[in-house]
Image (tube, grey):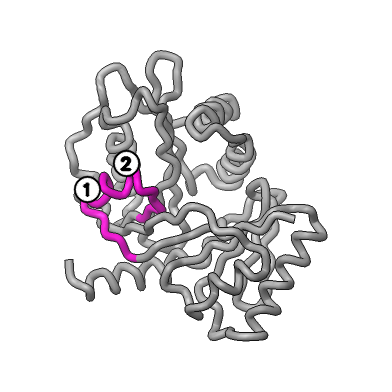
Amino acid sequence: MTDLDVMTLRAAYDNQLRPEIPDPVPAGVTVERDGPLVRIVGLDAGGFLTYRDLGGLTGDALDALIARQVQLFRERGQSVEWKLNGHDEPADLADRLRAAGFVPEDRETVVVGPVAPLAAALPVTPEGVRLREVTSRADLERIAAMEEEVWQEDRSHLVGGLAKEIDADPNSITVVVAEADDTVVSAGWVRFPANTGFATLWGGSTLPQWRHKGIYRALVNYRARLADQRGRTLVQVDCSEDSRPILQRLGLVAVTTTTPYVYTP
């Protein structure tokens, strides 16, 4: 993999996936623009700030843009996430966010790669585990309960957010659970952003006692086959340090990092 290949994949990520705006916009979700910034409210527990780039804003103008978001979400009494990519400009953007009260959470790696090899891989599901596509609220609640056990924090926002996306356009997202008997042991979903060549993978949390059995990889391959059926050629994941080595062994390439900067009133 050459630097040119990495830059090509990063450019595809920037040009096709950013800003990350749901399409269609689910009921109850608002999309607002503030200069180069896109503000999404109502999809998750708090707000979400996304952009392709900041249009060259620096200094006082950039501080004013950040301050407007702080004021707005302070008035709403809601938290908000500013998604900062490692190659975003200006170079001091992270410092300016921290100065305005945003707190960085765990950094993830953005990986991108071709769908075809993942879709062609021989499907191997661990013994005693089955993969199943789900849409019902009851199954989404089971996924949230599994994630709460994994992360030891409230994940109820997943239920409403995923349900809104499914209701808005069931063809834009597919949710897959891995079950052992009646227990959800892992889950992931794949989004098919409109007018792009991408499928994007999300989730993948697995109960501790079910890790290192190939379930995460099975979920990746399953969703890649769905992407291939849709004619998508590239797959993208924001991945943790736990899943990054697996995805890189499967042929995905690190193109940048992403860090959620969260402001909480």
Q: Nearer the viewer, residue 167 or 21?
A: 21
Q: Nearer the viewer, residue 130 or 65?
A: 65
- Earlier-in-chain disc, 1 versus 2: 2
**In the image, what residue occupies the spot 69% across and 49% down?**
27
Residue 119: where, in percent of width, then height?
Answer: 24, 44
- Badge 1 local density, few (<14 within 10 Å), some, or many (20+)? some
Considering the numbered disc 1 on the image, is that residue within a helix, a strand or a loop?
loop
Residue 57: where, in percent of width, then height?
Answer: 58, 84
Q: Nearer the viewer, residue 158 or 224?
A: 158
In the displayed structure, would residue 32 be above or below residue 187?
below
Determine the CA span between mark 1 and mark 2: 9 Å
Residue 136: where, in percent of width, then height?
Answer: 56, 29
- Badge 2 local density, few (<14 within 10 Å), some, or many (20+)? many
Q: Is residue 237 magenta?
A: yes
Marks 1,2: beta carbons within 8 A: yes
Task: Confirm whether residue 47 shows in the render.
Answer: yes
Residue that label 1 marks = 250
Q: Amino acid at mark 2?
A: Val
Magenta highlight range: 236-255
Q: Please indicate whether residue 182 sits to the left or right of residue 43 in the image.
A: left
**In the image, what residue occupies the spot 40% across and 14% down?**
181
Q: Is residue 256 magenta?
A: no
Q: Quadrant of residue 253?
A: bottom left
Q: Quadrant of residue 69?
A: bottom right
Task: Confirm whether residue 132 shows in the render.
Answer: no
Residue that label 2 marks = 220
**In the image, what residue occupies the spot 34% across and 43% down?**
242
